[in-house]
Image (spheres, rainbow, N blue to C red):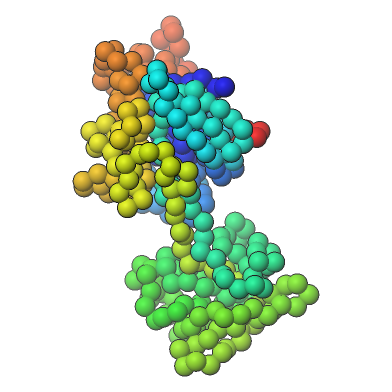
Amino acid sequence: MISCDTVIIGAGPVGLFQVFELGLLGLDAHVIDAVPHAGGQCTELYPDKPIYDIPALPVCSGRELIERLQQQIRPFAPKFHLGHTVTALQRLDNGRFHLRTSGGLAFNAGAVIIAGGLGAFAPRTLDLPEAAPLVDRTLHYKVTQPALFDDQDIVIAGGGDVALDWALALVERVRSMVLVHRSSSFRAAPASVARMQTLCDEGRMQFCEGDIVGLETSDETLAQVRVRTRSGMVRRIEASQLLVFWGLHPALGPIADWGLALERQQLVVDPSALQTSVPGVFAVGDINTYPGKKKLILCGFHETALCAFAAHAHRHPGDKANLQYTTTSPALQRRLGVRDTAGADVVAQPPPRLEASAA
């Protein structure tokens, strides 16, 4: 049994910054995430995509944002348990919480903060019997190594931002590219659609309107993609790699069974404290809802500050946490490790390395 002040469920950007806000108030945190690395959607969906709306950072990639957050929370020495799903949450008679994970860990926590983003999510997959043996070999639902597609004949399926972004990012690397989408209407940024159409006009890629109805293989690798076009004819496209970006189907997973008030698969919270319908259980980021909610990373960062004060009040009733500023508070500066007990400056340390805990 691991005893701690707080457990944070979710190691995305909001979950990581929650560690920081709790640390300023002297609360320790254990962070649990189902995937084997920190970063949430930033690393799963758009690690190399530029983000422009983080204060004081004109532009950074999803991966860079996570690295900076890891560096920022280093002084508070959070414990990470990656590759674990929280399968059970029980409120005890003394107001604390018992949690269990899929990897056999057990926690006794004073407060629980759910920062699970969209919840447990998985890509919408190609429902063809010949698809399964090709996954992560010549059929991909995400890109982890762009160099894998160098000088390859590729088909990209999808009409959203992820499909268009990767089409534009890879078009200079591949031998040939065909974008397949069920209609000529796209859900992507207009600028991306315009750029794709220009590339098609220049003969540097092709667009095929239709549905993928089959795959042809040769020596257990992809050889052709069969597409039924709007005319009803089936077109066979030579391809050595297929990338499918049909979006994600999010689900709360075990969280839905914890007796927390829900609205459209989101956790209902009090916006002043980010507390759910169960005292001591809080929710920040995309997983929560309240009047005026905006699903932006910077809004999630704001929520973590309010949540930290509320969690402190829950953990220490009657012990008011005074608002202090990192620019002037010696106590906060010592917690941050920028000043030692004698008031001397301390050299900053490099970002921490995160490792999944053993199941």
Q: Is residue 150 left or right of residue 247?
A: right
Give residue 70's position: percent from left, percent from top: 49, 35
Q: Residue at x 36, y 31 (%)?
A: 281
Give the image quarter of residue 336: top left
Residue 272, compared with residue 127, is above or below; it is above
Q: Nearer the viewer, residue 32 or 105?
A: 105
Q: Nearer the viewer, residue 4 or 92?
A: 92
- Number of numbered callouts drawn: 0
Q: Is residue 159 left or right of residue 319?
A: right
User: In the rendered image, which quarter contains the N terminus?
Assistant: top right
Residue 211, compared with residue 27, is above or below; it is below
Q: Residue at x 45, y 30 (%)?
A: 90
Give residue 244's position: percent from left, percent from top: 54, 68
Residue 221, compared with residue 48, is above or below; it is below
Q: Is residue 273 left or right of residue 47?
A: left
Q: Which residue is the extreme one toward the top?
A: 342
Q: Residue at x 40, y 20 (%)?
A: 93
Q: Which residue is the extreme one toward the right?
A: 219
Q: Which residue is the extreme one toward the left?
A: 291
Q: Nearer the viewer, residue 90 or 51?
A: 90
Give residue 349's position: percent from left, percent from top: 53, 26
Q: Is residue 47 visible?
A: no
Give residue 157's position: percent from left, percent from top: 52, 73
Q: Is residue 283 left or right of residue 173?
A: left
Q: Is residue 212 visible?
A: yes
User: In the rendered image, which quarter contains the C terminus?
Assistant: top right
Q: Residue at x 51, y 49 (%)?
A: 43
